Amino acid sequence: MRRENEFLYSQLANILREQIWSGFIKPGQYLMSENELCKYYGMSRTSVRKSLEQLAKEGLVIKRVGQGTIVAPDLKIPESKQKVLRILATSPSHYIEHCMPYVLEEFKRRYPNVEVKLLNFPTPDFWESVRASSELGMKPDLFFVTNRQLAELENPELVLDLSDVLKDSLPSIYPKLIEAFRTGDRLTAAPVTFSTVYLAYNPQLFERYGVPAPTANWIREDFMRTARQLTLDTDGDGIVDQYGFSLSSSISRWPVIAMQNGVFFNEETTKEGLLRTLQFLHDILFRNRSASLYQFSRLLNSEAFAMQKAAMILATSIELAGLRSLPLPFEPLVAPLPFGECKSTLLVSNSLLIPADAGDKELAVEFLKTVYSAELQEQVGRSTGFLSVFEPVNRKLWDKSYLESLNMTGDQINHSYFLHELFADYNLIEELEAEMEMFWAGMESASSFAARLYEMIKTRDHEL
């Protein structure tokens, strides 16, 4: 994990450096406190301090004892003589780290006289940071966002309709992705990568402990038995240090289990489906103790998986492609989701938007066309393991059985949903996350919380 820690502090140093050189944080202004940087970027205090030390060595910041870290007051920001394309991006992002370099290289080849400035903002307050940059007079040409941030966009009219811009690429893109990002007749976003949420497992741990690998038709009981067999005290100190399953409390992960039990958080949701879901979660967490609960934001629950402390996780190709850069000591495999009769799952994505008041709309459009080059889509997929938004590219790069295991072939993908398709009212997500704290702690029964959650959903549907 030493390499990962070095990567994290270098990543934060790059983010802060670009914010300074771009003028978002001006000479004489204070950076966020160390505590705030730890919170917003999901990093340890050690990584944050090493980042600030690096910037101090470069003469960009000065640490004032008892006050904080300030951008060097006498720092001179040079004016660029090139045309500049500004992209405001959510951070951290596996796509930005691993795929964007290929895009920038190709864009530079096409437009050698254009400088691309990529400014990263922390995920939790992305739109607030965008508003702040606007108040400072910064006009971005593109936004890079997650599907959740896209759903949180208050007014779709603030971004351009991309229907005409992408008309030549639309036949190659999965129709599901286009439908999900339409607002009426307007296409508000250009998806650049996506993934279903699926069950990944470590075949080395299965082989090491003689546990049969998942089969195509395994069911929930098989999963629970497998998780128990792979939950072990590996060093003999009396404490379990390896779990069969690492369960994330993130709203972008655990609802897959609910969906497999017919729960889609709408008016068709039943108390029975909710109870089956919540009882299962409590069974694996507290009765059988064959799963660990991961409640931290950084890397979701994949860190335990990467360290071989968990044999199975709910993951995405975006997440695992990012992990492979560590590198992983094993090659993850994909197992069919075994949690219920309904074969549905979640979708996640990254997208580019062009703000209506973009400084250079024509250049932003050319950047999108670069991203949507079939050759570049194939190069990125082949080099990084990220899925392409072009269906023909994925069929070329991956075999059919792999795509089937991701619920992406034929009509499968149409039974998978983004969070904004599950939750018509995004306020329900925040309310749900707050209300689940006692449940995740094992201090509220499945039946009690199922009843409360059912009423929450029904009340929201009635209000809508």
Image (cartoon, rainbow, N blue to C red):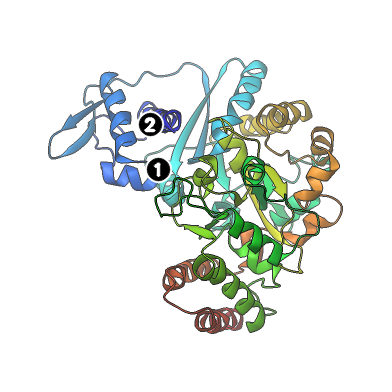
For residue 160, say whether it is visible: no
Lateral position of residue 23 relative to residue 241, left or right: left
Residue at x-position 46% and y-position 68%: 440
Tell me the SS state at disc 1: helix
- Give the labeled residue for mark 1: 41
Kind of residue indicated by mark 2: Tyr
Q: Secondary structure under badge 2?
A: helix
Point out the frontmost of discs 2 and 1.
2
Q: Quadrant of the C terminus?
A: bottom right
Vertical comparison of 438 with 51: above or below: below
The x and y percentages for residue 336 are 74, 55
What amino acid is found at the position of numbered circle 1 in the picture? Tyr
Total marks in image: 2
Residue 460 visible (yes or no)? yes
Image quadrant where residue 74 sits? top left
Identify the residue position indicated by label 2 in the image: 9
